[in-house]
Amino acid sequence: MMVLAEAMSSQAVDFGITLTQHVLRKQHLHPDARGQFTRLMAQIGVVGKLITAQVRRAGLIELWGETGDMNVQGEHVQKLDRIANDTFIEVLRRSGCVAAMASEEEDEVIEVAADRAGDYIVCFDPLDGSSNIDVNVSIGTIFAIYRRTQPDRVVPEDILRPGREQVAAGYIVYGSSTALVYSDGHTVDCFTLDPSCGEYFLTGENLRMPEKTTMLSINESNEPYWPSWTKPWVDSIKARNDPQRRRISSRHIGSLVSDFHRNLLKGGVYLYPADSNNGRGKLRVLYECNPLAFIAEVAGGAATDGTRRILDIVPTGLHERTGLVVGSKTEVAGVADFIARHG
Ligand code: AFP
């Protein structure tokens, strides 16, 4: 069995650095910091612990299954979706760091009472990949953090703004362990929750998206609805394989946050194109695409809807959807070429 000293010496990162310690260490990069961001990240960490506790016991305490309600997206709400959403809202409402929130599960913006409001706006998907809950497959929470634009009131532009204005973004994956990954725009860092002491420790520092694509993540059953460039593009990626050597593997979990996390670590491209009939994608700009595009870019990757950089989209509605291609920079750049050739 690996003893603690061995584990410490085998770590590529500073062993024993907690999430809060790490955020504090980086405060010098933000000379106007007032400590609110540090508190906000600590509270998001708490949200991750509370949701982890529910996810880990879901099968034991009847948290699998649907509530019987539909959400604003017209999807069946799972019991864990509801719990994760309420947890996120209530923890952040009490944090003193947040002025307003937008959730994938809520119809309207959630404003925080003035006496508790802070500097930040948070958009989040409380539990992404909820169709995977009942079958013990990885799911996650995704969040985007912006600074409020007005000191005394929340305005629509606080929420309906391009993703490039994010000050930070991150996600928590409830997988074989609970991992919290976030970027403050300078680096992308990964923390793993140690369940024995309830603390997040730094386990990956300054993550870089591998330039080489080895994983292709797409739901191929949607092929009849793909726009015309998608199939030739997918075929061109698969054509990198030959009988002597497999260079590309197909991996699609159906939980964007988990697919993204794997591709960030292993090198891959994730694709959910806009539907050729209605021109809309499935994924939500505010809660899924923006935060993951932000992380991808800071890690050296890129994200597009096919023609536009994801972070330049100015959403006109809270629950706007878009097509998404996210992965290494050269892979994503190649999409424009296929669109020019195949439309
Ligand atoms: P749910 O949270 O409703 O399961 O949606 C998950 C998701 O938005 C994203 O995480 C997946 O990658 C994508 O949908 C999967 O959608 P398909 O089932 O259409 O492939």
Image: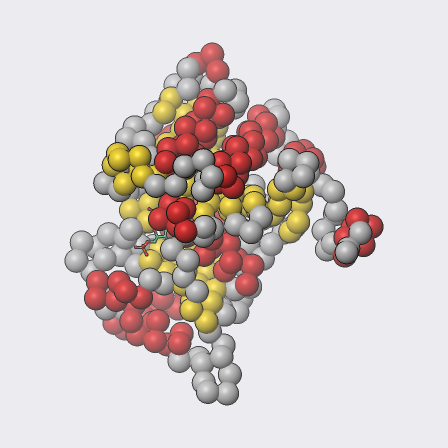
Residue 104 position within the rendered picture, expressed as x and y whole percent measured from the top left: 34, 37
Q: Would you say 53 lies left or right of 283 here?
A: right
In this view, the residue in front, 37 or 222, is 222
| Residue 326 sits in quarter | bottom left
Q: What's the residue at 25%, 66% (across, down)?
A: 223
Q: What's the residue at 31%, 35% (across, down)?
A: 67
> In this view, which residue lies farthest toward the front?
60
Q: Quarter of the image containing the N terminus? A: bottom right
> In this view, which residue lies farthest toward the bottom?
244
| Residue 101 sits in quarter | top left
Against 1, residue 245 (above or below) is below
Residue 175 position within the rendered picture, expressed as x and y whole percent measured from the top left: 52, 50
Q: Would you say 320 lies left or right of 142 here?
A: left
Q: Quarter of the image containing the C terminus? A: bottom left
Q: What's the residue at 64%, 51% (across, down)?
A: 204
Residue 68 position within the rendered picture, expressed as x and y whole percent measured from the top left: 26, 35
Q: What's the residue at 58%, 48% (across, down)?
A: 177
Residue 201 position within the rendered picture, expressed as x and y whole percent measured from the top left: 67, 42
